[in-house]
Image: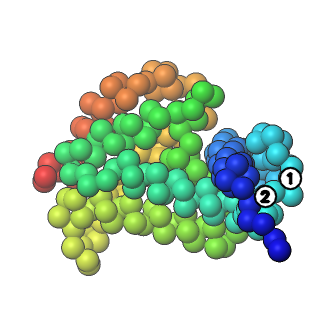
C-alpha cells in the first residue's frame, strides 16, 4: 500500500515550483531565453536541476509557465479596470521592479524564446492585453484603428520597462510609480482619449 504524500512534502513541492518560477522569470527577463540554461535557473532557485523536468517538462515548459503566471498576475492586478485607471496600472507594472531593477512581468513579454509554442503564447498575451485595453476605449471587433492605438499604448509601456531594465537613463531608471503616473496618463489620454 502506497501512502499519499504528507502535507509538508506537498507544501515543499509548491514552494520548490514557485522558487523555480521566480528564478526562471528573473533569468529569462535579464538574460533572455537563449542565454539562460536550466542549470542557471536551478542554481538560482537552490534546487536540483532535475526538478525542472519534474515540474515543467523542459526549459520551454518553464518559459511557458513563466508567461502564463505573468499574464495571470497582470490580469489579477488590473482586474475590472476602467480606462481612467489604466495609467495607474501601467505605472505600477513599469515601476514594479525587483531589487536588481528589472520590471520582470513587462520585460518577460518582450523576450522571444525561440520556441514556437512559447512565442505563440507570448504574442497571444500581448494581443489579449491590447484587445482588453481597446475595449475599455470603446473598441469593437473590426475597428483596427482603435486596436492599433491600444497596441501602440502597450508598446509604449513595454518600452518604458525595457529602458528601465537595460539602461541607466535617468530619471526614467529610478522613477517611482508616482513619477510615472502623470506622463503615462498624458500618453494614454493622447493615444486612446478619455472615454471612460
Q: Quadrant of the N terminus?
A: bottom right
Q: Position of residue 121 (x, y in %)?
A: 55, 68
The residue that disc 2 covers is 52
Whole-percent x, y for residue 93 in the image: 43, 41
Residue in the picture at 21% in, 73% down: 140
Foreground of the two, 8 or 181: 8
Q: Which quadrant of the view contains residue 55? A: bottom right
| Mark 2 burial class by Cα count in 10 Å: few <14, some 14-19, many 20+ | many
Expressed as whole percent of the image width and height from the top left, the position of residue 186 reads: 24, 37
Disc ID at residue 49 = 1
Relative to 113, is 157 above or below? above
What secondary structure is marked by label 1? loop
Q: Evaluate whether residue 35 shows in this view.
A: no
User: Where residue 195 appears, x then y in whole percent?
Assistant: 13, 53
Q: Is residue 163 left or right of residue 141?
A: right
Q: Is residue 103 left or right of residue 176?
A: right
Look at the numbered discs 2 and 1 and tell me whether their residues touch, using CB distance below 8 Å. yes
Please give the name of the residue rendered at 66% of the width and 73% of the height, measured from the top-left corner.
116
Q: Residue at x 46, y 51 (%)?
A: 73
Is residue 11 shown above or below 59?
A: above
Query: Looking at this view, is 193 or 64 the one in front?
Result: 64
Secondary structure of the residue carrying tag 2 is helix
Q: Using the rendered image of the protein, determine whether residue 158 is visible from the camera's viewpoint.
A: yes
| Of residues 145 and 92, the one drawn nearer to the viewer in this rendering | 92
| Dot 1 alpha-carbon crowd within 10 angstroms: few under 14, some 14 to 19, many 20 or more | some
Amino acid at each position: 500500500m502506497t501512502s499519499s504524500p504528507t502535507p509538508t512534502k506537498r507544501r515543499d513541492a509548491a514552494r520548490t515550483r514557485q522558487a523555480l518560477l521566480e528564478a526562471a522569470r528573473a533569468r529569462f527577463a535579464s538574460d533572455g531565453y537563449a542565454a539562460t540554461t536550466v542549470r542557471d535557473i536551478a542554481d538560482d532557485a537552490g534546487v536540483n536541476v532535475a526538478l525542472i523536468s519534474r515540474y515543467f517538462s523542459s526549459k520551454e515548459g518553464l518559459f511557458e509557465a513563466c508567461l502564463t503566471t505573468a499574464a495571470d498576475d497582470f490580469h489579477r492586478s488590473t482586474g475590472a479596470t476602467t480606462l481612467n485607471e489604466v495609467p495607474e496600472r501601467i505605472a505600477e507594472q513599469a515601476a514594479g521592479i525587483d531589487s536588481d531593477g528589472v520590471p520582470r512581468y513587462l520585460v518577460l513579454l518582450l523576450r522571444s524564446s525561440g520556441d514556437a509554442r512559447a512565442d505563440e503564447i507570448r504574442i497571444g498575451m500581448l494581443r489579449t492585453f491590447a484587445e482588453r485595453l481597446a475595449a475599455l476605449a470603446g473598441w469593437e471587433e473590426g475597428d483596427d484603428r482603435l486596436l492599433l492605438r491600444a497596441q501602440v499604448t502597450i508598446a509604449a509601456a513595454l518600452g518604458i520597462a525595457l529602458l528601465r531594465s537595460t539602461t541607466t537613463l535617468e530619471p526614467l531608471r529610478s522613477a517611482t510609480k508616482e513619477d510615472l503616473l502623470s506622463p503615462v496618463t498624458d500618453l494614454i489620454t493622447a493615444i486612446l482619449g478619455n472615454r471612460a
